[in-house]
Amino acid sequence: WSSSDSVISTDSAGEHSAEPGRPYRVVLLGASGVGKTAFASIFAGAADSMDSDDCELYEVTEKEIEVDGEPASITLIDTWDSEQYMQTGDAYLLLYSITDRASYLRASELRITLRRFRPAQNTPIILVGNKCDLVRRREVSVSEGRACAAVFDCKFIETSAAMQHNVWEAFHGIVRQLRLRRDSKEA
Ligand code: GDP
């Protein structure tokens, strides 16, 4: 039956996150010093993760987490060679530090680069303003963060990796967006 062939070929040509069982690839992006490593170590937690640091350019942690009562497998990629990994992600956490305006501007640049690599409108991206514990050193206001996210059509959250505040909310948020996208594809 010819139409089933076309369904199969559409699937295999489409986004690979629809494959059952394959972990979602979530990439941490952002200027140096914004807290990507801190995010990755919170994600990795203690014993139940697999770290590989044999490649000097990135670290990968694979882990299953539970979001809204449903398990989700995530491969978290923490990279400082970001452009190389921009094409490989299913979703992105775009970090800046609220204490560092240059990192906020860098996040905008990365968002634009990302759009070039991932032109699909519905790629899940969360803009993350980290280090919100450092109130006295704040250089980027909450409303600037929100405005930037609105311009770039992504979600926004402020976090503190140091206080472990909102970090899991960011990971859970990205899984929810991935699921929404998956469900809208299946519909
Ligand atoms: P990366 O270069 O993006 O991987 O940044 P790191 O995770 O190495 O963080 C850079 C520095 O900022 C380290 O000294 C961290 O301890 C510190 N840091 C990261 N997140 C936070 C945070 O939320 N609050 C505070 N106060 N410090 C943080």
Image (spheres, rainbow, N blue to C red):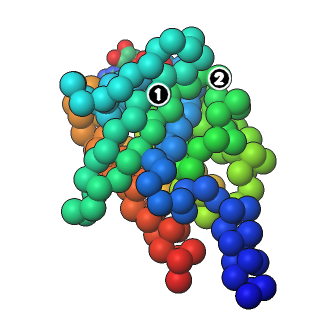
Q: Is residue 32 left or right of residue 13?
A: left
Q: Is residue 183 above or below residue 161?
A: below
Amino acid type at circle 2 is Asp
Q: Quadrant of the N terminus?
A: bottom right
The residue depicted at 44 percent of the width and 54 percent of the height is 21
Q: Secondary structure at mark 1?
A: strand
Q: Is residue 69 above or below residue 3?
A: above
Q: Position of residue 9 (x, y in %)?
A: 74, 69
Quickly name the residue at label 2: 81
Residue 37 quadrant: top left
Residue 86 tag number: none
Front of the two marks 1 and 2: 1
Amino acid type at circle 1 is Val
Q: Earlier in the sequence, mark 1 or mark 2?
A: 1
The residue depicted at 69 percent of the width and 82 percent of the height is 4
Instruction: Tell me the quadrant of ligand 1.
Output: top left
Q: Secondary structure at mark 2?
A: loop
Residue 60 tag number: 1
Few, some or many residues within 10 Å of mark 1 (<14, 14–19, 20+)? many
The residue depicted at 74 percent of the width and 56 percent of the height is 119
Residue 24 or residue 125, whichever sits in front: 24
Q: Position of residue 43 (x, y in %)?
A: 32, 34
Q: Is residue 18 left or right of residue 160?
A: right
The reply to whether the residue tagged 1 has its Cβ within 8 angstroms of ligand 1 is: no
The residue depicted at 21 percent of the width and 25 percent of the height is 47
Tell me if I can see residue 26 in this picture: yes
Label 1 – label 2 distance at C-alpha: 13 Å
Q: How many marks?
A: 2
Q: Is residue 94 above or below residue 82?
A: below
Q: Are marks 1 and 2 in contact (CB under 8 Å)?
A: no
Q: Is residue 184 left or right of residue 86?
A: left
